[in-house]
Image (cartoon, helix red, strand yellow):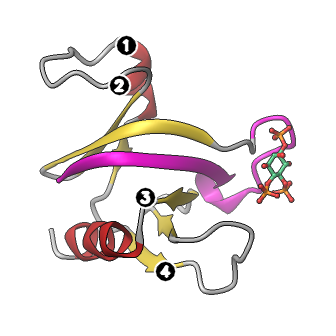
Amino acid sequence: KNGFLVRKVHADSDGKRTPRGKRGWKTFYGILKGLVLYLQKGEYRPDKQLTDEDLKNAVSIHHSLAMRAADYSKRPNVFYLRTADWRVYLFQAPNTEQMQSWITRINTV
Ligand code: I3P
């Protein structure tokens, strides 16, 4: 599954709150391949190669959990992704259908 996602980093590994200055929303093109969610920066082209920076932003979704961010009301269509090492991301999808489809795909790999 692919598509635009806006990401906020809420907690770093071990669940520690991500410090101020690193909590802003950033737009990526998400590519879910196997157990990895790649997050590509910049303009989307289907043939674009992943850069070293894109690889650093990649998220392992093995033993992760995605759920709708029912308690987050500042933006619509936001879901949480908690990873196996207790990182927490918020992702905003372009619409409700996309949000639901990301959640389902992440939770059923
Ligand atoms: C963050 C940025 C986020 C905001 C976050 C800020 O600042 O303004 O948009 O989250 O608030 O810390 P920075 O880019 O300097 O990290 P919201 O959009 O959810 O308000 P937070 O610390 O309360 O999460």
Q: Which mark is residue 81?
A: none
Residue 11: in sight, yes or no? no
Whole-Å distance between the Cαs marked 2 and 4?
25 Å
Q: Which percent across, then down, holds residue 72?
A: 69, 76
Rendered residue at 77%/56% (across/down): 17
Spatial CA span between label 3 and label 2: 23 Å
Q: Which residues are magenta?
A: 1-22
Disc 3 crowd rating (10 Å Cα; few below 14, some 14-19, many 20+) is some
Q: CA distance from mark 1 to mark 3?
A: 26 Å
Q: Is the residue at mark 4 in contact range of ligand 1, meaning its CB lies under 8 Å from it?
A: no
Residue under label 1: 52
Q: On the image, which quarter does residue 38 sit in?
A: top left
Q: Name the kind of residue labelled 1 in the image.
A: Asp
Please state which of the two labelled residues, at mark 2 or mark 4, is closer to the viewer: 4
Q: Name the disc covering residue 68, or none.
A: 4
From the viewer's perspective, is residue 15 above or below residue 107?
above
Q: Is residue 47 above or below residue 58?
A: above
Q: Which residue is mark 3?
A: 94
* Amino acid residing under circle 3: Pro
Tag 2 residue: 55
